[in-house]
Image (cartoon, helix red, strand yellow):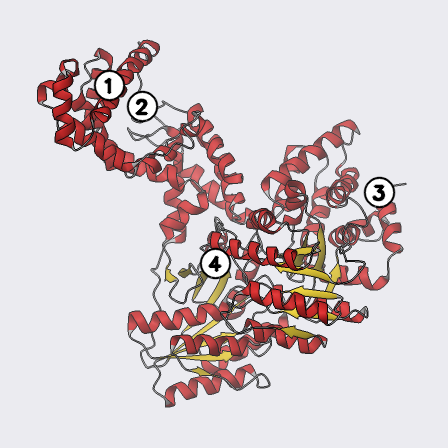
Amino acid sequence: MAFENLADRLQNTFRKIRGKGKVTEADVKEMAREVRLALLEADVNFKVVKDFINKVKERAVGQEVLKSLTPGQQVIKVVQEELTALMGGEQSKIQWAEKPPTVIMLVGLQGAGKTTTTGKLANYARKHFNKKPLLVAADVYRPAAIKQLETLGKQLGIPVFSLGEQADPVDIAKQGVEAAKADHHDVVFIDTAGRLHVDDEMMAELVKIKEAVSPHEILLVVDAMTGQDAVNVAESFNQTLDLTGVVLTKLDADTRGGAALSVKAVTGKSIKFAATGEKLDALEPFYPDRMASRILGMGDVLTLIEKAQAAVDAEKAKEMEQKMRTLSFTFDDFLDQLAQVRKMGPLEDLLSMLPGAGRIKGLKNIKIDEKQIARVEAIIRSMTPEEKANPDIINASRKRRIAKGSGTSIQDVNRLIKQFNDMKKMMKQMMGMTKGKKKKNPFNLPFM
Amino acid sequence: MSFFKRLKEKIAGQTEAVTGKFKNGLTKTRASVATRVNQLVKRYRKIDEDFFEELEDILISADVGVATVTELVDRLKDEAKSRNIKDPEALRETIVEVLSGMLTKSAEEPQLRLNPDGLTVILVVGVNGVGKTTTIGKLAHRFKQEGKKVLLAAGDTFRAAAIDQLEVWGERAGVDVIKHQEGADPAAVIYDAVHAARSRGVDVLLCDTAGRLQNKVNLMKELEKVKRVIARELPGAPHEVLLVLDATTGQNALSQAKVFGEATDVTGIVLTKLDGTAKGGIVFAIRRELDLPVKFVTLGEGIEDIEPFNADAFVYGLFSDMIQGEDGTPSA
C-alpha cells in the first residue's frame, strides 16, 4: 500500500542524490517533495505540512553531510529532529493540584474514546501516583454511557459518581467534585459527552462545566486515525476551553497518526498520553521521537541511520574494504563483520531497513534465523587461528573436530565453508565491477 | 447541456427533503471546500501549475488522499489540455464533473440488497468508536417506518455497556434485541438471533459487532467466524455487510475498508458523522482503490438522521455554492 510506495520512492531519491559533501538546494527540494507526501499520507494537515517543510528547507541547505550518511539521509535527519522538536516540549505530566482534589476533565468528539480513556487514566493515576480517584459520569446523552463508565469502575474497583441520565451535566460535575472532597478522593475524572466542535450549544455546556469546577487539566481526547479535520477540532476545543493537553487514542491501529502533529502544531498543547490497546492498562506516556518516526513512515530508515552512526567503525570498514579488494578476507574478518552488523540489532530488521534491499529480488521475504547466526559463530570460533586464516587447510578430520567443538554436524561445517568460498568468489566479481570507483557506502556488506 | 444543468435537473427530480438534508449536513464542508475552489478560480487569471497545486491542497484538505488527488488533478490537466481550457472559471465545471463521475457508477448502487423471500441479515462492522451501534439504531427505525419487522442482535459482547446501549436504541425504535451477557461468544449471540429471527418471522435482522482495529488478527478471525455462522444458519446470508466509517478518519479508512473487506466481504459503507467539518473525502479513495459503494450517510444525532447515499446530492452539497454561482447568483 501507500507505505511501501513511500519507502521505495524515498530509496530512489536517496540513490539519486548520493555522494556529495554538502546538502545542496536541489537535494533539499527533491527530498522535501517526498517528505511532504509522506506527511500528507500520514494525515498531517496540509497547512502544517507547508510550514514544516519550509522550516526544514531553511535548516538543511548548506549543511555538512556526516561521514556515514548520504545527503538524502542528512535531510531526513533534519526532518526527524525538527519533527521531534515540534512534538516534544514538556513531558507528559499531570498537573496535580496543590490542594486536592485534582480535577481532570476529558473532552472530545464522539467515538474518540473518552469514557475508556477516563477509566485508563484513573487506573494510571492510582497505579503510578498512588492516588485515590473518583470517576464522574457527565455524559447524559449517549445511551448507556453512564452504564459504560460504571462497568469500567467496577472492573477497576474505582467508584463512579452519577446522577442518572436526567440530570444536568453541570450539576453532575459540581456535585461530583463535592462528593470527592467529602470522600477524600484526591483526583476526580469527569467524563463528558462526545460533541462536535461546531455544535455551539454543546460547546457552551463544556464552558459551563469548566466554570463550575475549575479543572486543573482539560484533556482533549483525539483518535489517532483522524484525518485533516484534526486541526479544526483541536483549534475549536482549544479556543473554547484552553486545553491543558491531549490524549491520543487507538494508537495500536496501523495508522501513521499524523493527527498528533496537526493537533500539537495548532494548539501548542503537548500530547500527554497515548492509548495503545483495549485493556484498561493500555495507556502510556507519549514519546515524541517515536511518533516522529512513525508519522514519517521512515522509522526504519531513521533507526538505521542512527544505528549505523553508532555501530559502524569507519576505520574498520575501510580496512575491510581493502581486504575485500585484495581478497585476503578470512573467517576472522567474517566474524568481525558479523559482530559489527549484530551491534545494529536483529539481522532480519536490519535487512528490511537497508536502503535498496527492497529492490533485490528474493531478499524481501528472506527469513534470517538468529540461531543460525549463532551456529555460524560457534563453528568459526571452533576453528584454530590457522584454519581461520587459511580455510583451505580444513580437511575431513579438522571438520570433524570443528563440528564436535561447536556442537554442530559436519554437514553444517561443510555448508559454511562452501558459503564462505562462494562469497569470496562473489566478492571477486563485485570487486572487478567496481574497480577504480571509490565506494563509501558502509552498507556494502559482502554477505548481504 | 452543461453538466451543472444536468446535475440540477437530476437533483430537482428528488424530494426537497433529501437534498435539503445533504445540504444542511454538508454546510461546513461546502463552506470550506466549495468556497475555496470558488476563490481559487476567481484569483487565478490562467490555469497554471500553481493553480493545480492549490487545487490539490483543497482536495487533500478534504481527506481525499495524495494518490487519488494526484490522479484526479492529472485527469483535470488532460481535460484542460484537450478542451483547450485556459480560463479557470471554465475549468470549475470540469472539476465537479470529474469528482462526481468518480463516485457515481449507477443510480441503483446505494440500494440495500434485501432478501425478496424472507429474512434479510445485515452485519455491521467497523473499528472502535465509528458509530456502529448508533447506525443500527437509526437503520432499525428506518426499516420499522417502512413497515418491516426488525430484530437486533447484540453482538458486541466486549465493550462495557454496549449491550445496554443497543437496548436503548431498540426501545427508541420499538424493536426487540437478542442478547447474551457481556463477555459471551459473539458468534453464539448471532446464532441465537438468526434462529429467533426465523421463528418470529422477522424481515430484517441487524447484527451489531464489537469495534475492532483491523490490524488485530484474532479479532478479525472472530468476525470471520460470526459471518461463517450466519452463512451456515441461513444460506445466502448475510445479505449485506456494512462497514461503518467515521467521516473524520483520514487515510487509515482505506486500510479499514481493505482489511474488513477481506475478512467479511464488505458490501457497502456507511459514512457517519458527516455533520461536523469533516469532509469524508476518503470515500473517493475507497471508490478508486476498492470500488466499494457508499450506501448510507449519517448527518446528525437524531434517530432519523440517516440517508441512503446519493452521489449527486453529495456532490451537490459539496459544491452547491459553485453551482449557484454558475447561474449568476452570487456565490458565498
Tell me which amino acid carries mark 4: Lys
Residue at numbered disc 4:
A250
Circles 2, 1 touching at the beta carbon (< 8 Å): yes
In x, y percent, where is residue B232?
64, 56
Residue at numbered disc 3:
B3
Query: Element type at marker 3?
Result: helix
- Quadrant containing the N terminus of chain A is top right
For disc 3, the chain is B
Query: Which residue is more in the foreground, A361 or A120?
Result: A361
Tell me which amino acid carries mark 1: Glu
Of callouts 4 and 1, the N-terminal one: 4
Residue at numbered disc 2:
A444
The local crowd at label 3, few if under 14, some if 14 to 19, many if 20 or more residues have their Cα within 10 Å, is: few
Of callouts 2 and 1, the N-terminal one: 1
Residue extending furthest toward the bottom: A182
- Tell me whether marks 1 and 3 sit on the same chain: no
For disc 2, the chain is A
